[in-house]
Image (cartoon, rainbow, N blue to C red):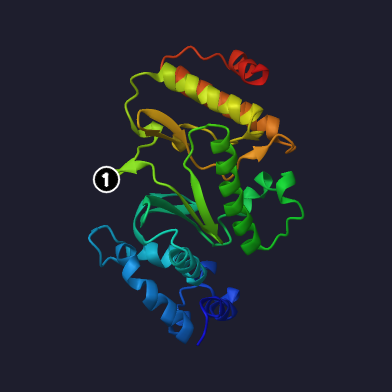
Amino acid sequence: MTSDDDFDEDIEEQIDVKSMHGEGGESTEWMDQPKMKKMFQEIEHRLQGVLGTGQYDWVDRRVFDQVFDKSTLLSIYKLMRQGVIDTVEFPIASGKEAHVFYATSIDGPRAVKIFHTSNAVFKGLTKYIEGDPRFGGLKRRHRELVTIWVRKEHRNLKRLENSGLRVPSAFEVNRNVLVMEYLGSNDGPSPRLRDIKIENPKYIFEQLVNFIQVSWKDADLVHADLSEYNVLWHNDEPWIIDVGQAVKSAHPNSEEFLIRDVRNICNWASKKGVEAPFEETLLRVLEG
C-alpha cells in the first residue's frame, strides 16, 4: 500500500512547472495523469461550488480555469486532508493578485485566498520584498516569488494580530493558497469602507490612525498600501486586509510607505468632513 505521504510525494514528482496552466497556457492534460486524477476525484465533491454543481449559482468557468491550476489544486488537496478546510464554495473578492473564496471548515467559515501564478502579476511587487530582512537571499524565479509573497502575508497577519490589531486571523498557508478568518455573515462578506455610507468618519479615522501607530511602534510593520479599498467594515469596526506588501521598519522604503499611508487616510478623512491635518497626524504616529 502507498502511504498518504508517499502519495503526496508521487504527485509532487508529476508536476511539471513549465506545463502548468497558471503560467499562461490552457492545457489541462495533467488532469489525465493517474495520480492527479485520483487526487482530483477525492476532492471533487468538496469543490462543487467552484465547479458550478453546488447550491451557489455564481459560477464562471473562466474563474476556475484562471485560478485552479495543477499546483493550486494540489495545495487545496493538502489543506483539505489536513482538516484546515472542508469545501471551497464561491468567490467573495478578486483582484489583480488573487481571488478570495468562501470556504467551510469544521470550525466554521473560512476565507481562502488563492494568489494568481501568472508571471505578469507579481512583477511590480519585488520592491516590497527586497530589503525586508525576513526574506533575504531572494531569488528571481517567479514561482519562488509568489510563494514568498503568500508566506509574507501570513506572517504579517500574525504579527498584526499579536499586537491586538483587527486583521483576519491567518490559519494556514500552502504554496499560493492562504486560509484566513472569514469576515462576513451568511448573507455575504463584509463590505469595503469604500462601498458603505459612513455615519461616523471621525471614529473610523481615529481607528485607522491607531492601526498605523500600533503597527509601526509595536508590530514593527507599515502596511504600505492602506486605503479605503482594503479596510472592511465588520461588526461595526474597521478591519484591515491585504497586508502582503507590509514591510518592517528596517526596509529602506518603510518611512516613505508610512508617509503614504498617513496621507491616504488623511485625504480620505478630509473628504468625509473630518479635520485631519497630515503633519499633525504623522507626528502622532511617530511620537506614539
Instruction: Give the quadrant of the C terminus.
Output: top right
The 10 Å Cα crowd at callout 1, few under 14, some 14 to 19, many 20 or more, is few
Residue 144, percent from left and from top: 65, 61
Name the residue: 45% across, 67% down: 81
Tell me the quarter of the picture where residue 10 sits: bottom right
Work out whether 22 lies above or below 268: below
Q: Nearer the viewer, residue 167 or 33?
A: 167
Tell me the quarter of the picture where residue 278 sits: top right
Q: Residue furthest right?
A: 137
Residue 33 in sight from this viewpoint:
no
Report the number of discs.
Answer: 1
Name the residue: 73% across, 38% down: 251
Q: Name the residue type under label 1.
A: Asn
Instruction: Identify the secondary structure beneath mark 1.
Output: loop
Residue 201 in sight from this viewpoint:
yes
Name the residue: 44% across, 77% down: 39
Residue 261, percent from left and from top: 58, 29
Residue 171, percent from left and from top: 50, 51
Work out whether 272 lies above or below 238: above
Work out whether 211 lies above or below 78: above
Q: Which residue is mark 1?
A: 186
Q: Is residue 149 left or right of residue 70?
A: right
Q: Is residue 19 left or right of residue 179?
A: right
Residue 102, percent from left and from top: 36, 53
Name the residue: 53% across, 31% down: 164
